[in-house]
Amino acid sequence: MYFRTSSNTRKAIIGAFLVLLFTQAMLFGGYTLIKRDKYIQYKSFAAGRLNDKISSLEENLNNLLIIPLAISAMSNIAANLDTIYMYELAENYVKKNPLIRNIAVAPGSIIKFVYPYTGNGKALGVNLAEHPLQKKDVLEAIRTRKPVISGPVHLVQGGIGIIIRSPIYHRFENDTSYWGIISLVIDHEKLIRYISVVTSNDTLSYSIRKICSENDGPKYIYGDSTLFLKQPVTRKIRLLGQEMWEIAAVPQEGWNHIQRVPLWILALGNFVSILISFLSYLIIYRHYKLQRLLKYNKQLVEELNSTINLKNKFFSIIAHDLRSPFNALLSLTSELVNHQHELPEADKKQLMEYVNQSSSKLYELSHNLLTWAQTQTKQIKYEPQPENLTTIIEDSIHYSQSMLLAKKIDITPHLPDEVICFCDKNMIGTVVRNLISNAIKFTPKNSTIEIHLSQEKNSAIIAIVDYGIGIPDKTFNNLFRIEKSLSTAGTEGERGTGLGLILCKEFVDRHHGQIDVQSEEHKGTSIKVSLPLYKTD
């Protein structure tokens, strides 16, 4: 089904749609600001949590890094290896720090002491500098003279550990050469738990990595390595051995979930947007409707004013232009009635001729008035059909013979045998008669009027040319305006209503034709009427 909408409705819909787009854009901007604010707030929260965990991690690792140095200094390893004292010393550190799984001492990189012995005894005698799994980190520690932390690794005795390998050097005045390695195995699970990385109520996911050289790349200590690719909040710590660690945190449900705008806000925002758009539709629709009503009322006022002017003109014509010919006719007939027996036959004949002329003029005037009134009230039917314009013009010339004889004017017609036009015969006949009547009126006695009929492209051209007094400039621009039209006296004082040309214009317009007037004062007038030809196809 096809529904037609008024222009006001379309304009209101377009306006409401633009308002909807604008409000939706504003909502989108608001949602973006809310998401950005939540993102910033949560990043701040994550940074605070990371700072707490970094402090705990840094404290625990630095405490562990101090232990090998303390053992070296307290046991005077550089002088000899006292197994009993070493055992007591190691036992004391393990008891104080539950993160330590075992402590091993390797003079010359060969393990000579391990605590606890149970489960770790097989390590005695192992050369760490040659062991395939230990060699790289041990040589790195010896080369850099700094502790090396590696892991997490799966331990032989079970579990996962992080190994701290600290190189020890002689402390003699003249000897600072390499002495050996002290290794601490740290319980990975306990370390993570101690720094509270894993808690039941935490909403963050964490990952810890050791930053190595560009060639080696980072080594991941804990968590999902891909967290560092998810726009994490990160913090770095530098340990006593100058190693750099980095910890990252992201929301467990992802940043998109954190930035999600609550559904009730989305629903409320869209409801307000639609409500504003609907109200805009009503306002715009009523605005355009009011404008249309105002325009319509203005047109009504203009039409009413025009109708009033036409009415005034019509009554003016009736009051003035009809009175003169009636007075003349009454005067002539009274003269005939009162002096019919006294007047000579020649005078009677002349008076009868005057009566006939006055009657003809009165008829023509009345005919034009009635015809014009009918056009204004839409009572004249427009019934076009194929007609021969030559016949219509010849009939009009014949109709005008009495006026032509009265002024001794000749008409020279230049007419082809047949020009077929699709027109209303009565209307075009009225047009031609009025134009011939005007030409006679403004042409002096003993003159000539020419009538031409021709074809140009798809039009028939009727041209009526006289060599009379012409049209004054002040009258020319108002020829076809009823409210401005003026009746001009003819060469013999003939009067009219000024309606003739107006009727011609209306009838020609009805046929979708054109009427063109060219005139020069004291030289004559040429009026051309173009009408569409009849198309047989």
Image: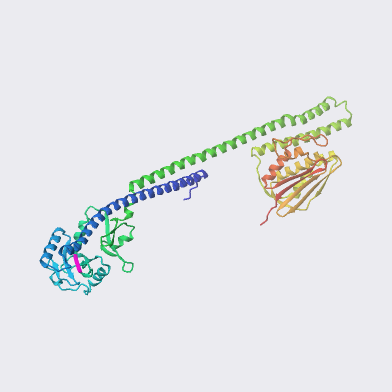
- Which of these two is toward me, 326 or 125? 125
Q: Vertically, is 474 above or below 144?
A: above
Does residue 159 appear left or right of residue 475 in this picture?
left
Depth order, front residue of 404/21: 21
Q: Position of residue 41 (x, y in %)?
A: 32, 49
Residue 260 visible here: no
Residue 440's x, y, as percent? 81, 40
Horizontally, is 210 left or right of 290 in the view? left
Q: What stretch is highlighted in magenta?
A: 180-184
Q: Which residue is drawn at 21% across and 60% down?
A: 66
Q: Residue furthest left?
A: 84
Residue 183, magenta (yes or no): yes
Up the image or down, 319 lies above or below 472; here it is above
Instruction: Name the foreground residue: 478 vs 121.
Output: 121
- Is most of the magenta stretch helix, strand or loop? strand
Number of numbered discs on residues: 0
Q: How is the image coloured?
A: rainbow
Instruction: Locate residue 392 relative to residue 54 in the image: left or right.
Output: right
Q: Does the magenta stretch include residue 318?
A: no
* Percent x, y of residue 358: 79, 33
The picture quadrant where one finds residue 521 is top right
